[in-house]
Amino acid sequence: MWRRRARPNLPCAEAETSCHKALVANEPMDRKNLHIKVLGLLESCRSGGRDFVASAEADLLRLGEDAGSVLAAALHHANATVRCNALWGLDVTWQSVREAAVPAMIQALDDADPGVRRNAAGKLGDIVWRQQSAWWERQVGFGEWVKESAQRAVVALMIALRDDDESMREEAASSLGGINCWSKDAVPSLIESLRDRSNTVVQVACWALTQIGNWTWAVEQSAAPVKKIIPPLIELLQHEDGSVRKQAIWSFQEFRELAHDAVPALVDVLRHGQDSDLRAEVCRALADIGATAGGVLQAIVPALVEAGETDPSESVQTSAILALDKARPRGRGLSLPSVRRSDLAIVPRKQRRRGLKREDAEALKSLLAFLNACVNWPGDVVSQRELRKSPLLKEERKRLGLPEKISAGTVHNHLKTLARLCKVERIWDPEPKNQFSTFRAGVKERLLQRRPYIEEEIAIEEEKAGLQAYPERLGPTPPEPDAIA
Amino acid sequence: MSEEPTRRSIMFPEMRKIFREIDWDTVALPSDCVTLGQLRHAIGGNHKDLGVFVHNLTLTEQEVARFALSEALRAPFDQDAALVPRVLKEESAKELASLYQEAGLATGPQHASQLIRDLESWAATEARKHVPDKPR
């Protein structure tokens, strides 16, 4: 899937080390000299390393608000590299330059050099995005100008979508997708770009439309832009280029329930498409659409069942089965009449064998019997089997009114619970080369400490169930709090 | 948390009274909104399992709520005493989470945890009614 690439925020060329050193060595200097130095830096950016970039950034930031005028002037420099570096400088100093940055960059969109134009289109998106983020997070006291700048940038980028240079169009579409919260008005222009002669531009425009559609739906709760976007994206499923078709499928997957109109077209690709990768992608998209839009399951489920059973590619079959599992109305009951259980038979649901859960008091008594058996165990060496079969445990269970037999699973669970109550990983350590284990130090004492609390829980539980409250262990019923008072 | 032998919770007589007074029929629980359709889906068509599933769901839910309340009542006085209901609650909560998901009450583990946290907050509120001036 096409995604916006993170651009390194560096000057477009590197600096000559000797020139750079000469410039940097000039400190301290007054404001006028600093201006000269910055212009010099912009001119000298041909070769240099990270140190140079850091120092150039520092110099630009020292200029503060003045950086705007210096860099705007540099945008008219005869050398295209200097103009490119001035764009980089604006990007670095966006916080101090404030509203001057966007108009300067918009101006650079008309530059004679395609490289500068391309750079300006990319940086414009970045800077608007940063400004809006800072505005939202209230990091800086930006005013209404952020909105105005963004709107102006969107208009300029919409015009840039018609540039002759393919890379420029790509950057412009990418920037519009990046600043999706402002780009709602650019939807018609981006839809036009879906007919671009460059497949890359089409892919980027498709991505940008998805970003804008998702934003308007998620934040503004408006499905209107998506309604406009879906039909041209459906047409893209017939595009000659496989990457473009895949990008469109990904867009439907992102739109989820909003893409229900695309289901017939997607099902058609699943049934008649030649590319197995695309068919697998369609399965995933249908899963996401079906999981959120129950109304289209009637169309989705039979297609996925068919693909799961008869598709020539095994990977598509697997994708279809997984998709079917995801799309079916789990947790919403079978209230949708369109879904028949026989349709879902391809992924038979693993049914748990259910047993009647024991009442709380009974389960707690079982735990208490186990605890008592551990506490009264003669010696420190024990094995799980030995304990389970021991007369001590049987007697204890009988005394508490429980059946004498206990399953290995219950023993295992009780051991885990007791270990947690003692705040240890396990209550006994296995002996090396031996089937027996040894009680951990202090475990029996801790178990003894916990016993009264378990007994209290049993008493409360029995009382809740209307039984006599475990009198033989608790002794006489304590007086009521009122009586204590 | 100290490992020293602790005195028995002074709250116990009062706790018994509190538990006796709780009317479980009026406690709002997540399973209040479960429908027969959801239950039918949960049991996967085997109608004999319906009663068992409902029994397990309601019992486990009440068990978690009860242990949570027990923990909330004990915790201000004795952390060691609160450990027992806490461990028992956590054991039951695992089972309850899977039951919530099977019943369609929760869309996933996170949602199930949220529902269980609701039970815990009910318990904390209930406990606060009885021990208002104790640190929590």
Image: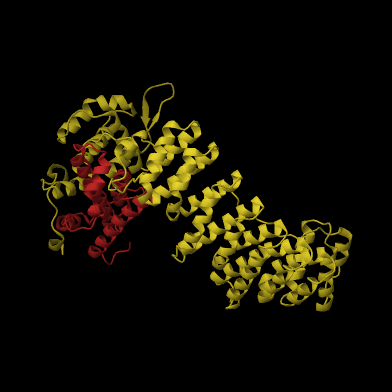
Q: Percent x, y for residue A234? A: 51, 51
Which color scheme does this rendered protein use?
A: by chain
Q: Percent x, y for residue A10? A: 74, 59
Q: Is residue A24 visible?
A: no
| Along the line of sight, the residue nearer the viewer: B8 or B47 | B47
Above or below, A140 relative to A348: below
Above or below, B48 relative to B62: above
Chain depicted in yellow: A
Residue A379 occupies quadrant? top left
| Along the line of sight, the residue nearer the viewer: A375 or A193 | A193
Q: Is residue A334 visible?
A: yes
Which quadrant: the C terminus of chain A?
A: bottom left
Which residue is depicted at the point 28% across and 33% down?
A410
| Along the line of sight, the residue nearer the viewer: A424 or A130 | A130
With B22 as the anchor, is A319 left or right in this view?
A: right
Residue B118 occupies quadrant? bottom left
Which residue is depicted at the point 55% across and 47% down?
A238
With A156 as the anchor, is A419 left or right in this view?
A: left
Above or below, A347 relative to A478: above
Q: Percent x, y for residue B23? A: 16, 57
Which residue is depicted at the point 45% across and 65% down?
A222
Q: Percent x, y for residue A373? A: 25, 32
Which residue is depicted at the point 77% across and 64% down?
A84
Chain depicted in red: B
